[in-house]
Amino acid sequence: EHFLVPDEGLSQALPLECRMSIRHTSASNPAPTLIRNVSVFAPEALGLRQLLIGGGKLLWVGSPEDAAPSIAGLEVLDASGKRLIPGLIDGHAHVTGGGGEGGFATRVPPVPLSRFTAAGVTTVVGVLGTDDLARTPGELLASVYALREQGLSAFAWCGGYHLPPVTLTGSVRGDIVYLDPVIGVGELAISDHRSSQPTFDEFLRVASDTHVAGLMTGKAGVLHLHLGNGARGLELVRRALDETELPAQVFHPTHINRRKALFEEALALARRGCTVDITAFPVDEGEDAWSAADGWERYHSAGAPAERLTISSDAGGCLPTFDHDGRMCRMDVGSAHALLDTVRELLARGHALETVLPAFTSNIARHLRLAGKGEIAVGADADLVILDAAGNVSDVMAQGVWHIRDGELLRVGLFENAQADRI
Ligand code: ZN
């Protein structure tokens, strides 16, 4: 077996728990795997199936009575009574750690590997937020590459809240065109006291640069927009659609459920062709906001186009509450677990798994043009989650490698154990 240990000398110098983690995070050449008797949601319900996985891909899908291709060294997993879904895609996560809005001590630490995998997330798009100064595009890319080395599929938005957007190459177009993981720009803040208060022209320039870079590369070329609580809401996007040639799919507003009136604006934009993003943040009783589950229900009952809704977690981001003077009075940290919690909440309310899943899987994969992601299909990446009868994560595979097996975490980031020991 091949381990990605940098060198034995370094490995020996680390404490024992770190060395064990290195072995756990190492890329290996996993055995081809046959998963039998599992109820597959692709996300559409396929019924009982068996799946053959090899080389990080889904190679074959058959009915339970089909004879599976015979392959030497095949590992067989019987998943009777369980459901198999595509690995979730988190389109908005502060992988470097976000925060920093209440002083330097409020900078959130980087989000380690297992915070995603344990939450059933196998693809993540990293983002810089309010702090796009002490946090840099280089740091974001390094965090994305680190997650990739550990087996997750990871991408990045370039820029951050502010204008001009922070970039590595000097321009938004350069970052999208030249940097493989960069798929668009975000989270550019609008209608927020922490934004750069972009003018309409400034807003259009970023949007058009993003769009053109997408055309040049076949990447999504999406402008992922942080929406604040401001009354102007989605006015800039509406004007862009009314007054310019820019296509609606360029604009991907997020946090649309943070204010009820904003949510109605987002519904109208979805009908005009925008894909809109709900954030799975906690919502208090009586707050002028919809929880992610409430937002999902409201979106569907309004008859908005089902394929234009996505849900992200804001993992690693700080969730501040500001007082009337604009001072932060409380802070929580977002978690990728919020996605699966929302799935479970919607199932508990009686919605079908195949109806719930697209916002977390196929919709976001299609919108962000993440090939091979968000679906269970022959030729797709072997990113999958097996849920037990109670809806808990039983097994997680990312690009053909097990990260969780029978509820047990097999792989953790290099310093995860070391961190936990010190806390
Ligand atoms: Zn945001």
Image (cartoon, helix red, strand yellow):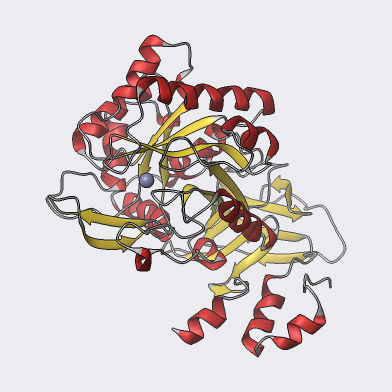
Q: Is residue 364 visible?
A: yes
Residue at the far right in the pictured view: 72
Seen at 66% across and 28% down, the residue is: 218
- Residue name at image x 37 percent, y 55 percent: 344
For this rendering, which residue is in front, 63 or 407? 407
Q: Position of residue 219 (x, y in %)?
A: 63, 31
Quarter of the view holding residue 38:
bottom right
Q: Identify the residue shown where x is 56% and y is 53%.
A: 140
The structure residue drawn at horizontal position 30% and vertical position 27%, both measured from the top left corner, is 234
Judge from the rendering whether residue 163 lies leftward or rightward of residue 266; answer left or right. Answer: right
Tell me the quarter of the image containing the C terminus: bottom left
Asked whether 360 or 83 is in front, the reply is: 360
Question: In screen coordinates, is 250 left or right of 70?
Answer: left
Image coordinates for residue 313, horizontal then vertical, percent: 41, 52
86 and 73: which is toward the camera: 86
Residue 98 placement (x, y as % from top left)? 42, 57
Asked if residue 420 is positioned above or below residue 188 in the image, the reply reads: below
Q: Position of residue 245 (x, y in %)?
A: 47, 11
Asked if one can make out residue 45 in the rendered structure from this viewpoint, the answer is no
Left or right of residue 300, residue 357 in this image: right
Q: Who is closer to the viewer here, 404 or 160?
A: 160
Q: How many marks?
A: 0
Which corner quadrant holds the N terminus?
bottom right
